[in-house]
Image (spheres, rainbow, N blue to C red):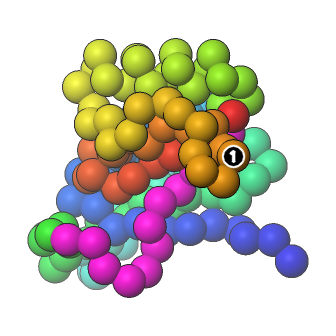
């Protein structure tokens, strides 16, 4: 069994779409709109791996204000240590928050952690 997709609510649908397409090479579906429910979404596909569904609904307007139980982050494999450094630098220069600089973690992974437009944590790993 494989994960088909993971979904995120957002109030910044177009910014989130642009972020995952621009920086992580995602391919976006056409926007799905259900006016009766005030719902809009995109599926962002990353090759043959799981997709990310980003969703917006008119009655969901407040972001989470603190960490809580549930999903913590999404991780993308950049392939090399140099690619992790390069993408982290590019994201910082473009104004995105870097939670953790590129480093080798205690469990042996090489990664950085940045925030997407909504502040969700995104790991960039090698």
* Relative height, residue 115 to residue 62 (above, below): above
* Relative height, residue 106 to residue 61 (above, below): above
Q: Is residue 73 magenta?
A: yes
Q: Position of residue 47 (x, y in %)?
A: 75, 42
Q: Position of residue 104 (x, y in %)?
A: 60, 37
Q: Is residue 106 magenta?
A: no
Quadrant of the snapshot with the C terminus: top right
Confirm whether residue 23 shows in the render.
Answer: no
Q: Position of residue 5 (x, y in %)?
A: 63, 67
Residue 52 lies left or right of residue 94; in this view the side is: right
Residue at 41% over, 18% down: 89
Confirm whether residue 75 shows in the render.
Answer: yes
Residue to which mark 1 is pinned? 108
The picture quadrant where one finds residue 46 is top right
The kind of secondary structure element at disc 1 is: loop
Residue at 27% over, 72% down: 67
Q: What is the magenta range?
A: 66-77
Residue 59 lies left or right of residue 35; in this view the side is: left
Residue at 69% over, 59% down: 50
């Amino acid at each position: 069994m494989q994960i088909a997709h993971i979904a995120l609510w957002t109030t910044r649908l177009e910014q989130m779409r642009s972020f995952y397409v621009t920086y992580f090479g995602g391919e976006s579906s056409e926007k799905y709109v259900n006016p009766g429910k005030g719902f809009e979404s995109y599926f962002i596909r990353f090759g043959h791996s799981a997709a990310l569904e980003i969703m917006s609904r008119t009655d969901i307007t407040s972001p989470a204000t603190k960490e809580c139980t549930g999903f913590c982050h999404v991780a993308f494999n950049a392939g090399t240590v140099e690619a992790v450094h390069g993408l982290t630098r590019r994201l910082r220069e473009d104004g995105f928050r870097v939670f953790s600089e590129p480093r080798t973690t205690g469990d042996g992974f090489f990664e950085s952690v940045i925030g997407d437009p909504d502040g969700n944590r995104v790991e960039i790993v090698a």
